[in-house]
Amino acid sequence: MTVSTARRNAFAFSFVLPWRRVNSALDQAIRDETVAKRLSELGADLPAPRRRTPQALGQLVRTEIGKWVPLIEAAGVGGN
């Protein structure tokens, strides 16, 4: 393992635990009927419990990147 790979892995790992806690807290909140009802009233599209996992989010992000990057590139839009 190279130094840069080790740094990337450590950097990525530093986000894993906090995000798992956030995911758990959000999932618990969404399971509350009052919270879920209010979020729905506000227009939130609440995923089914099986789609509220970190793995499901990762898949959604990969799908969205695959969908939007080609369109952004084709439009010639770029960041600084």
Image (tube, grey):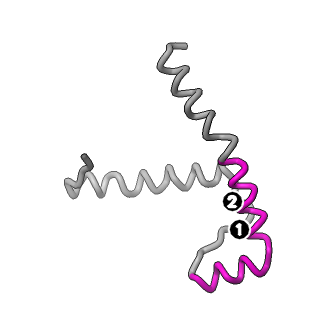
Magenta span dominant secondary structure: helix
Q: Tell me which residue sits at (55%, 20%) in the image.
A: 6
Q: Which of 27 and 22 is in front in this view?
A: 22
Identify which residue, 53 or 25, lies in the foreground. Answer: 25
SS at badge 2: loop
In this picture, is 25 found above or below 37?
above
Question: Seen in the image, is 9 located left or right of residue 30?
Answer: left
| 60 part of magenta stretch | no
Say few, some or many: other residues with alpha carbon within 10 Å of mark 1 (under 14 / 14 to 19 / 20 or more).
few
Q: Which mark is residue 40?
A: none
Residue 42 location (% of width, % of height): 58, 83
> Where does residue 52 sit, x and y in percent of width and height?
69, 59
What residue range appears in magenta? 19-42
The three-letter code of the residue at mark 1 reads: Ala
What's the residue type where badge 2 is placed? Answer: Arg
Q: Position of residue 10 (x, y in %)?
A: 59, 27
Q: Is residue 72 left or right of residue 25?
A: left
Q: In this view, does 58 lie to the left or right of 70?
A: right
**Residue 27 sits in quarter:** bottom right
Look at mark 1 in the image and give the residue it sits on. 48
Q: Is residue 41 above or below residue 56?
A: below
Q: Are marks 2 and 1 in contact (CB under 8 Å)?
A: yes
Query: What is the distance, in whole Å, between disc 2 and disc 1 at their CAs?
Result: 7 Å
Residue at the extreme bottom of the image, as rendered: 41
Reading the image, the residue beneath label 2 is: 52
Question: What residue lies at 62% left-to-right and 86% top-to-bottom?
Answer: 41
